[in-house]
Image: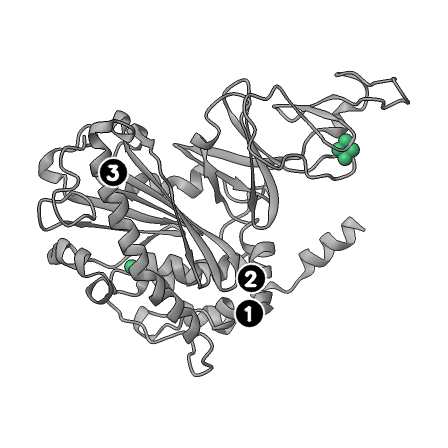
Amino acid sequence: MLNTVRLAREQRNLSAVISDEILERLGRDTASARGLPNAAFVDPAFHELEKDLLFPHTWTFAAAASFVPNRGDVLPLKVAGRPVILVRGNDNAIRAFHNVCPHRGARLVTETQRKKVVLTCPYHGWSFGLDGGLRGRPHYHGPGSHQPAGDEGHDEACLFPIRSVTWHDWVFVNLDGQAEPFETYIAPVEREFVGSDLSVFRRSEPDMHFEFASNWKLVAENFCDFYHVFMVHPALDIAMADTTRRAMRPNGRHMFNGYEFAGSATGIAPDDATLGLPVQPGRSRENAQSMVFGLIFPNAVINVYPESLQFVHFEPIATDRTIMHMWFYYVDGAASAPEHANARARIFESWAQLNAEDEGICRQLQEGRACEAYDGGRMAPYWDAGTIHFHRQVALAMRHDDVPRDPGSS
Ligand code: FES
Ligand SMILES: [Fe+2]
């Protein structure tokens, strides 16, 4: 049965999902390129295909490592609709497993757990170590006849592991286990942040969660669209230095940008809100007004300012519904120090304002995709190369035509 399903998936004609013609249009120079067709944003069947073909096939962000700060912490979450758990083990490493009991398939964990020694299935009581290994099966051989750890057959009944890597405070997973090595995937991102010290950033509270009535791709590409700042974000428009306004620059399957602020502000707040916050080591006040920013394909963003960092995840909920999660980071103790509470609050408020300004536009982007006259758009050559690059990466990933698979992975 399973092999039949697998065979059907392998034999699926993926170029029927994204045709050669669509790919050709995405490969043209920006001025004559056309973006993804409307169906990619409005058709629930395409949304389901993304869960099957796109997200399991690439590395994708799962959760912040600081959500499971201590040994024995367990976090249930969903990746591409699949229940997953992140577990911090006794060796302090974070592992990802499918959140399912290998016995009869019960979902194992339903809420965040702390300081666990074993994970016990609520159905028949099979228990698992933090490394995923089976620890015991009560009454396995009959009433009162338990099977202890290490018995025969245990290797067959461990939790199902998921390939995962913790990069700074962010855990990425690859559900199908065959994406390129993580080092290859993340290398362009690392190169872009060579001048930054990401290791000094600590996550602060609160988080921001913002709901958009639009497809996740529209929310992501809007976040990377520097063209709309003139019209949609008046405060940011004043704060940004015109001389450094650039379009997104593709690098690998990701894309990046950087710009500087015109005034004294070193964040998006257009005044002195961030003054007093400590900056990363090696970043002087002279270059403190520049930031670097990137879309980590497919659906995460990292903004790095000298004194703050925002990590963003666009969680696809439905074809026309996305939750944007935004986590805020500051240099070491500044993440929690009371004397910086006001600066943190003002940065938070500035982002809330920006997201509110984007909310209506993202809804209109979604609504416009109901018009059959729209065929992927007429692009602005100076600004829209990033959008086309992003669409092309989605198309290639959906066709499984993007990068060499990793034969050594499991
Ligand atoms: S389903 Fe988990 S122990 Fe039976
Ligand atoms: Fe915006």
Camera-nearest residue between 188 and 383: 383
Amino acid at the residue labelled 3: Arg
Drawn side of residue 255 relative to residue 134, left or right: left
Q: CB of residue at label 3: within 8 Å of ligand 2?
A: no
Q: Secondary structure at mark 1?
A: loop
Between the C-alphas of marks 2 and 1, the distance is 7 Å
Q: Residue at x 42, y 79 (%)?
A: 374
Instruction: Report which residue position mark 1 lands on.
Output: 43
Task: Work out whether residue 120 can be spotted.
Answer: yes
Crowding near pointer 1: few (<14 within 10 Å), some, many (20+)? some
Camera-nearest residue between 318 and 250: 318
Residue 129: x and y in percent read: 65, 22
Instruction: Report which residue position mark 3 lands on.
Output: 344
Amino acid at the residue labelled 2: His
Q: Secondary structure at mark 2?
A: helix
Instruction: Report which residue position mark 2 lands on.
Output: 47
Camera-nearest residue between 297 and 185: 297
**Colour treatment of the image:** one colour
